[in-house]
Amino acid sequence: MVSTRTAGLAAIAICLVLGGALRADPLAEQPRSTVGYPTPDAALAALHAKPSVEFSTQDGWTIASDPETNTVWSFPPQRDPAYPAVVKRQMTPAPDGKVAVQMDVLCSATKAACDDLVRAFERMNEEAQRQVQGGD
């Protein structure tokens, strides 16, 4: 089940993205979408069609929480450099009692903006895992 803590962590990621990320070497890209949809708009439409998905807006970002799959989807607003994009994060318990975060990103903006988006969410995922595991 996606908790309010997870939603709060999504807000942290949004702040990181909106605040900009440090430039680094370009990240590797996937040859095709790994989020399960061909475009961010298609993902958003499919999520709207699922009655169990809960939607919220945080700093202009659309956040879709799917408790059935323990997945949080984050869509940046049009003003964001990474728009159009979607970040799909699924949290699953690992055998060692820790939490694993599977993240997939589909971003159609510039390479630099997409890389910044991925790096910001990677940092947020690491922080979320530390908090869940008691490493505040």
Image (cartoon, rainbow, N blue to C red):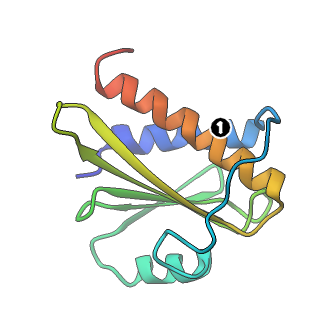
Q: Nearer the viewer, residue 78 or 114?
A: 114
Amino acid found under the numbered disc labelled 1:
Cys
Q: Nearer the viewer, residue 133 or 19?
A: 133
Q: Is residue 127 above or below residue 76?
A: above
Give the residue at mark 1: 15
Q: Position of residue 132 (x, y in %)?
A: 31, 28
Q: Residue at x 74, y 64 (%)?
A: 83
Q: Quadrant of residue 136?
A: top left
In this rendering, position of residue 33 left or right of residue 5: right
In this rendering, position of residue 123 left or right of residue 112: left
Q: Residue at x 35, y 15 (%)?
A: 135
Q: Residue at x 78, y 38 (%)?
A: 20
Q: Residue at x 79, y 39 (%)?
A: 25
Q: Is residue 133 above or below residue 10?
A: above
In this rendering, position of residue 125 left or right of residue 112: left
Q: Secondary structure at mark 1?
A: helix
Q: Position of residue 12 (x, y in %)?
A: 55, 35
Q: Is residue 35 above or below residue 127?
A: below
In this rendering, position of residue 31 left or right of residue 45: right
Q: Nearer the viewer, residue 16 or 117?
A: 117
